[in-house]
Image (spheres, helix red, strand yellow):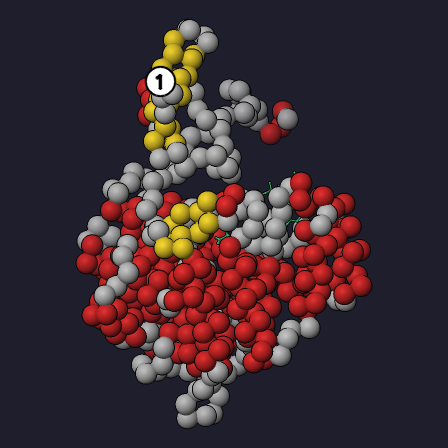
Amino acid sequence: MAESITITDNRTGESFEVPIVHGGVDSSAWKKNLPGVWFTDPAFTTTASCESSITDIKGDEGILRYRGYPIEQLAKDSNYLEVAYLLVNGELPTTEQYDQWAHDVTHHTYTHENFRRRFMDGFHFNAHPMGMFVSSLAAMSTFYPEAKDVEDPENRKLQITRLIAKVPTLAAAGYRFSIGMPYVYPENDLDFATNFMSMMFKVAEDKYECDPAITKALDILFILHADHEQNCSTTTARTVGSAHADPYSSVAAAAAALYGPRHGGANEAVLRMLDDIGSYDRVDEFIEGVKRGDHKLMGFGHRVYKNFDPRATIIKEAADNVFKVTGTNPRLDIALKLEEAALNDDYFKSRKLYPNVDFYSGLIYQSLGFPPEMFTVLFAIPRVAGWLSHWSEMLEQDSRIARPRQLYVGADVRDYVPIANR
Ligand code: SDX
């Protein structure tokens, strides 16, 4: 049995064979044999936009691997900085490589003072932290004009280091601005997660201190959110990057996509949904509303995972460890009841709807002291490593500019009619 498909044009009776390679069929044979006939796939539900070696998801089996390493092993034995190195470079670092990487990231966490004093302070008092984060990423491109030289690998490496290092600083600055607190500067002797917590929550104490169980849970959440192949925001990063826009502009575009409630905005929407439900005994009424189509069950469903999201399983375990320190989140009972009701209801089972990464993450973030409007920013901080890995891979592949075709279904040619005659 040949690993191929045969396509026949019934208008001419001519057929051509296309091999199936890496689970896909290349469109070039189609373009050659059927010029002017396009595939239509509006949300790319069955279209591979690229070849990638970064992340592998097997939706039916609930498998997620970064560069071949199972997410369960990385969450248990690695840390976010090491995972970011793996995503960007393709291999786990040696001790020497890791130490250099940690040193480089640590020494790129500061932002230009004009950025804070003139840009961040220009936002309206109630600006949403994610709106500030998206804008800040784009603004960063004005501080590093040399980043436009996207075809220089060494320059790409420097900008990638800068962005991975600075996004916690940008995120924390937005939060501190939103609550009217002074900015807290990065501290070089703190690890990545602790440094972020310090920039977020330090007040008057000399040194910010945090329970290691808390920073470990946050680091695991960063690992779980670091990449997820061609999701909406990563596809955006590759698309904008294919125009040879600089990495700050490409990542800002990706962050804007993540902001959407169907994507990274879902974790904040889950918390608001749990608050709207309000109590354990109103869960069944809410579920009926979902089935009527009145609202979505936020944090449920996924384009790829059709049995379970492996990240949700790991997050649920991390939540237990956090709640041992912080005390349980009162919304947890509602969330557990919601999950149980949905998983036993044909409406959700028939549509293969299960909890995704966003269903429980918000409960942890809230117990760690983050307000809901910061949740998508918390998703974006580690996802920057994924976006940049794909941006860099796309440039290494010397990809052409992304420019899909369309099926025109509008009006045929017609003559202009002066307004007096309409
Ligand atoms: C992330 O792509 C990624 O990898 C994303 C992500 C990553 O790491 O980058 O994993 C992160 O974005 C996770 C998803 C977070 N979003 C939410 O939790 C929002 C709620 N979920 C839905 O909006 C939806 O499930 C999507 C957007 C996640 C997936 O949408 P699809 O694949 O386009 O599925 P669909 O909208 O075609 O739904 C299929 C059916 C429909 O019912 P019918 O019209 O066939 O009757 O399932 C229904 C939908 O109405 N449905 C839901 C539902 N999700 C889908 N019904 C109720 N509640 C939901 N959450």
Q: Residue at x 31, y 81 (%)?
A: 188
Q: Identify the amino acid type marked 1.
A: Glu
Identify which residue, 369 or 307, lies in the foreground.
Answer: 307
* Rendered image quadrant of residue 70: bottom left
Residue matched to label 1: 17
Q: Residue at x 29, y 38 (%)?
A: 400
Q: Residue at x 45, y 74 (%)?
A: 216
- Whether 205 is drawn above or below 317: the answer is below
Residue 119, x across and y down, in percent:
41, 71
Identify which residue, 138 or 49, lies in the foreground.
Answer: 49
Q: Is residue 218 visible?
A: yes
- Whether 256 is drawn above or below 8: the answer is below
Q: Is residue 381 visible?
A: no
Residue 75, x across and y down, in percent:
43, 64
Residue 11, x across and y down, in percent:
45, 8
On-image quarter of the N terminus: top left
Residue 52, x across and y down, in percent:
34, 44
